[in-house]
Amino acid sequence: MKNLPIALMLIISSLLAAAAAAPAPWVQTLTKGNKKITKLHFYVHNHESGPNTTVYRVAAASITSTSPTTFGRVNVLDDLVTAGPDINTEPVARVQGVVAYSDLHTVAIAMTVNFYITAGEFNKSTLCVSVRLPLTERLREIPVIGGTGAFRLARGYAVSTPYSFDFATANSVLEYTIYVITRSNEIVWTGF
Ligand SMILES: *[C@@H]1O[C@H](CO)[C@@H](O)[C@H](O)[C@H]1NC(C)=O
Ligand SMILES: *[C@@H]1O[C@H](CO)[C@@H](O)[C@H](O)[C@H]1NC(C)=O
């Protein structure tokens, strides 16, 4: 993201969260009837450069370098997800998938990723997300379209917001809150 247009850099900086998040457990569940509601709150470290790089550009279009919206850039990422905004807090997940800059008129991406949980009671379960994200907006709504393991048949949504952005490295931290609903009586057979 190092060669993003200055205008986009300014947009990003104006979106950053001012206040620190209140400390709370990164995962909470409650059961209501046959519904289990899971709330996940964590921070995604999107590193475009440096020793912990987790985002790599894999393709670009003939117009990407001159496009004000970076149209046609495709990135593959495997971002570290931690319980707190500091990268040295508890690692709880990875977010893995593809991001394509896919709007000719405004800076928006099509993002298809899986949250792969690596800690706690949902270890190794995944949440599948596919969304159009306007990077010009501070609060971004993201549908959860399914999952595996404990999240089989999951439905839900997430809210994401930029938490910090380092202009020197183009590395950013994104804060996510995900609400997931699973229903205990939907799984009749276990295993396959
Ligand atoms: C790289 O990640 C480790 C933890 O995974 C962290 O301690 C270190 O500060 C990070 N380095 C940079 C340059 O972000
Ligand atoms: C999560 O699963 C991995 C891989 O099987 C395992 O190494 C790790 O200890 C597990 N962590 C927890 C908290 O269960």
Image (cartoon, rainbow, N blue to C red):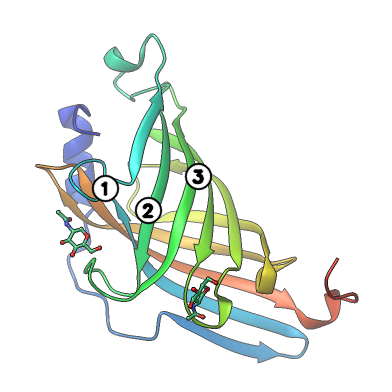
Task: Please rate how many residues cluster around mark 3, counting C-alpha atoms within 10 Å: few if below 14, some from 14 to 19, many from 20.
Answer: some
**Residue 79 bears which disc, if any?**
2
Instruction: Say which amino acid is labelled 2.
Output: Asp
- Residue placed at 44% from the left, 36% from the top? 109
Q: In this orientation, which residue lies closer to the viewer: 102 or 48?
A: 48
Q: Nearer the viewer, residue 88 or 46?
A: 88
Residue at 27 percent of width and 82 percent of height: 22
Residue 106 visible, this orientation: no
Q: CA distance from mark 2 to mark 3?
A: 9 Å
Q: CA distance from mark 1 to mark 3?
A: 14 Å
The reply to whether discs 1 and 2 touch (Cβ–Cβ < 8 Å) is yes
Q: Amino acid at mark 3?
A: Gly
Residue nearer the viewer, 192 or 138:
192
> Ligand 1 within 8 A of label 1's CB?
yes
Element marked by disc 2: strand
Judging by the rendered image, the residue that carries numbered circle 3 is 97
Q: Would you place residue 68 above or below residue 143 in this image?
A: above
If you read the primary sequence from the N terminus, does the residue marked by circle 2 or circle 3 appear first?
Answer: 2
